[in-house]
Image (tube, rainbow, N blue to C red):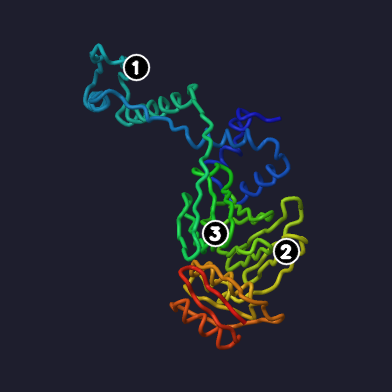
């Protein structure tokens, strides 16, 4: 088992943290996948490298200029008196006879050497493990929310949805939890994959745009707009990789999954302020309207066995939308405060 000290002594690890590239990213990603039990120590070592900064050593005020002037103009250089509170004592008998170029070169060498020596000295590091605070952002029916996370990723949260995320993000990953529906624009970070947990599914991305819908809690639809995502069940090791324009439909109860193309104008309509239905059944229509307008529907009698509706609306009142649907589907409705009564 490697310790954090072992990682800190590994030149390739240090290079990966300080100056990452695709080759190093690929190597350490494979290493972490093969050694998951050692990710804890790796994360600690990475935190140390990211937090430690060595202060630049500086000479006492005016000393460097005085020494330089003496070296350039004096044929004989005598030691200067240094103030008692100074920790520097200098003498230069070895400079006698040295040329101007050699003197300047020696000064530069001494400066760089001193800086290097100080950087190599043991530094006391007080590394405190910070437990992240999980933040909850929730929208009520009829509400929508746009937010930007600490890594720069932007999220649009649909009505009646909740998003949970840690503050700050972990040093090796970015993980959020979603209930409901949200559209993600994930900022690329090759060192920290972005994970979305949704009702037993885990979506992994590096930098991309996609929509996750789990409004009814019985199905999950993950629709990829750009980039690439990997979707896996928590108990499964074989993920589904989506390409732009593809959507994964997952049934929560049975676990059945299907990949197909999707219509962005339909799936992303809510983000642009549109209500769009495409061969939607009664349950889907009512659920969408409940979330959009913040109301509840009550049925006064049995519903038709077959019920499908297609249509689109933007910036219209609930009365206007219901009037349009009622004309096609032949039902009556009444609205009392936040309750809508339907009669077929």
Residues at marks 3 and 2 touching, judged by CB atoms closer than 8 Å: no
Q: Residue furthest front?
A: 300
Residues at marks 1 and 3 touching, judged by CB atoms closer than 8 Å: no
Q: Against 342, is 29 above or below?
A: above
- 87 vs 34, left or right, is left
Return the disc, 3 or 2, that comes first in the chain's sequence: 3
Q: Look at mark 3 in the image and give the residue it sits on.
A: 161
Q: What residue appears at the point 30 percent right and 18 percent down from the top-left corner?
A: 96
Return the disc, 1 or 3, that comes first in the chain's sequence: 1
Residues at marks 1 and 2 touching, judged by CB atoms closer than 8 Å: no
Q: What residue appears at the point 44 percent right and 79 percent down from the top-left corner?
A: 316
Mark linked to residue 94: 1
Query: Mark 3: which secondary structure?
Result: loop
Give x and y (percent) for residue 299. Answer: 61, 74
Mark linked to residue 191: none
Classify 10 Å Cα crowding around label 3: few (below 14), some (14-19), many (20 and above): many
Q: CA distance from mark 1 to mark 3?
A: 76 Å
Q: CA distance from mark 3 to mark 2?
A: 19 Å
Q: Look at mark 2 in the image and give the residue it sits on.
A: 251
Give x and y (percent) for residue 18. Answer: 52, 41
Give x and y (percent) for residue 290. Answer: 54, 69
Q: CA distance from mark 1 to mark 2?
A: 83 Å
- 142 vs 303, left or right, is left
* Total tally of numbered discs in the picture: 3
Return the disc, 1 or 2, that comes first in the chain's sequence: 1
Q: Against 249, is 187 above or below?
A: above
Query: Mark 1: which secondary structure?
Result: helix
Classify 10 Å Cα crowding around label 1: few (below 14), some (14-19), many (20 and above): few
């Amino acid at each position: 088992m490697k310790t954090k000290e072992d990682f800190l002594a590994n030149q390739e690890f240090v290079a990966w943290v300080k100056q990452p590239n695709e080759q190093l990213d690929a190597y350490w990603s494979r290493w972490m996948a093969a050694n998951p039990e050692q990710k804890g120590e790796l994360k600690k070592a990475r935190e140390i490298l990211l937090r430690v900064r060595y202060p630049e050593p500086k000479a006492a005020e005016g000393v460097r200029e005085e020494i330089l002037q003496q070296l350039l103009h004096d044929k004989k250089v005598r030691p200067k008196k240094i103030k008692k509170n100074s920790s520097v004592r200098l003498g230069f008998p070895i400079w006698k006879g040295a040329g101007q170029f050699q003197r300047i070169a020696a000064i530069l060498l001494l400066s760089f050497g001193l800086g290097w020596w100080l950087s190599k000295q043991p530094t006391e590091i007080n590394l405190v493990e910070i437990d992240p605070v999980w933040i909850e952002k929730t929208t009520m029916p009829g509400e929508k929310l746009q937010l930007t996370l600490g890594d720069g990723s932007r999220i649009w949260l649909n009505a009646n949805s909740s998003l949970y995320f840690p503050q700050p993000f972990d040093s090796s990953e970015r993980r959020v939890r979603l209930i409901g529906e949200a559209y993600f624009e994930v900022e690329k970070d090759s060192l920290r994959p972005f994970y979305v947990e949704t009702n037993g599914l885990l979506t992994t991305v590096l930098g991309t745009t996609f929509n996750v819908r789990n409004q009814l809690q019985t199905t999950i639809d993950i629709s990829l707009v750009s980039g690439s995502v990997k979707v896996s069940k928590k108990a499964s090791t074989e993920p589904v990789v989506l390409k732009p324009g593809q959507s994964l439909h997952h049934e929560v109860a049975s676990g059945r999954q299907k990949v197909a193309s999707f219509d962005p104008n339909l799936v992303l309509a809510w983000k642009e302020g549109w209500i769009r239905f495409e061969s939607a059944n009664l349950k889907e229509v009512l659920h969408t309207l409940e979330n959009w307008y913040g109301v509840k529907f009550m049925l006064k009698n049995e519903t038709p066995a077959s019920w499908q509706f297609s249509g689109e609306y933007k910036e219209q009142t609930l009365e206007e939308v219901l009037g349009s649907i009622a004309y096609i589907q032949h039902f009556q409705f009444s609205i009392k405060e936040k309750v809508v009564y339907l009669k077929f």
